[in-house]
Amino acid sequence: MKKMALIATKGTLDMAYPPFILASTAAALGYEVQIFFTFYGLQLLRKDLSDVKISPLANPAMPMPIPIPVLMQALPGMETMATMMMKAKLKKKGVASLEELRALCLEADVKFTACQMTVDLFDFERSDFIDNIEYGGAATFLEFAGDTDICLFV
């Protein structure tokens, strides 16, 4: 059986989709898949994903319907507006929500590992996170990743 390991380090809306899409696709293709969530990527394991946002600030590749000067991107409310626009676009195009993709991964037996060091660093409680995840450090991840066909840092 082929294996794929992913490291998810970011917790923004635009960076949340790649690990879930890649993991669910690989699992559907018969891969054994593990995602190691560390630093800000831990946000993707929280019970409530409604706080996952996207920021137009310092994100020059983000396509906007109209060009917005950098100074305006820093104004209060721009992050909320950008998040609403992105979520509306995803829905309009029929892209699954983060909650749906995460559930699909779990149903396909994708293993989710939360970085215990980061959990401790940010004073998270295990009750902050969804069920059916494991906790471990870099050594735990590397034990799996060292024997994979594909290893990605996203």
Image (cartoon, helix red, strand yellow):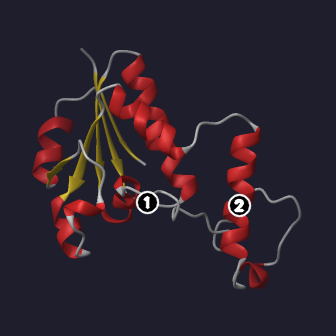
Badge 2 element: helix
Badge 1 element: loop
The number of discs equals 2
Q: Which residue is mark 2?
A: 84
Residue 8 pos. (x, y %): 37, 51
The residue that appears at 32% across and 65% down in the rendered structure is 39
Quadrant where the N terminus sits is top left
Compared with residue 82, is residue 112 higher up or lower down, i.e. above or below?
Answer: above
Determine whether, in the image, residue 112 is placed left or right of residue 90: left
* Disc nearer the start of the sequence (1/2): 1
Q: CA distance from mark 1 to mark 2?
A: 19 Å
Query: Which quarter of the figure has residue 147?
Result: top left
Determine whether, in the image, residue 84 is placed left or right of residue 48: right
Crowd tier of the residue under label 2, counting other residues whose Cα lies within 10 Å: few below 14, some 14–19, many 20 or above:
some
Residue 34 pos. (x, y %): 27, 36
The residue that appears at 70% across and 54% down in the rendered structure is 86
The amino acid type, in three-letter code, at marker 1 is Lys
